[in-house]
Amino acid sequence: MRIGFDLDGVLCDYDDAVFHMINRLPREELRVVQIHYFSTRKPLLNPELFLHDRDEYHVITGRNQGLRELTLRWCARHLPRAASVQVVGGTPRYEFTEEELTGLDPEFSLKGKRDKILELGIDVYFEDEPRNVRRLREMLPGVAIIQYGGILESEHPLTLGA
Ligand SMILES: [Mg+2]
């Protein structure tokens, strides 16, 4: 079986609130802080626990291309037996003007995950973000999309109006 894992919030720790605050930084600080944040993540789950003898696993992350090199290094160090590491996000936000940002496809990296899951023939994919789980299930009816980590959309503070 081919098993795919999201990285942030599944294989490594991730704080959504911190990430959103980082994205509000001025662009000259954004790059440096993003790189620091993602370089210092800690492993959260050992994907090898899910594997039988002939299974293989792939890491498929929606991180942007500015984080590609550090992500490959992090995975080589912490996930050395991954069959492949796929970084499918687009150009980093700090390379766009404010005007350009509003025109970007909000599902760009999600579609990148979808395409990579199909291309690699992934049977099961683990994802923490509830919205991504729902959309991937809609887009990939033949793939088992498993919610791992995260919180249910119905229990999300924003859904509850908190
Ligand atoms: Mg995630």
Image: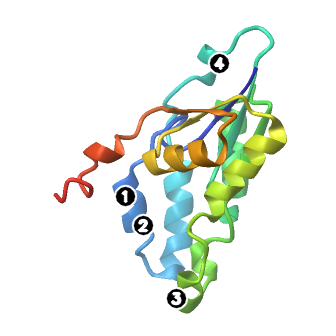
Q: How many marks?
A: 4
**11 versus 110 height, above or below:** above
Q: Quadrant of the N terminus?
A: top right
Helix, strand or loop at label 4? It is helix
- Judge by depth and name the residue closer to the eye, 94 or 148: 148
Mark 1 and 2 residues: CB-CB less than 8 Å, in contact?
A: yes
Single out the mark in the foreground, 1 or 3.
3
Q: Which residue is mark 1?
A: 18
Q: Position of residue 17 (x, y in %)?
A: 34, 57
Single out the mark in the foreground, 3 or 2.
3
Single out the mark in the foreground, 4 or 2.
4
Q: Amino acid at mark 4?
A: Glu
**Pointer 2 local density, CA inside 10 Å: few below 14, some 14–19, many at least 20:** some
Residue drawn at the location 82% of the way across and 38% of the way down: 120
Helix, strand or loop at label 3? It is helix
Q: Amino acid at mark 2?
A: Ile
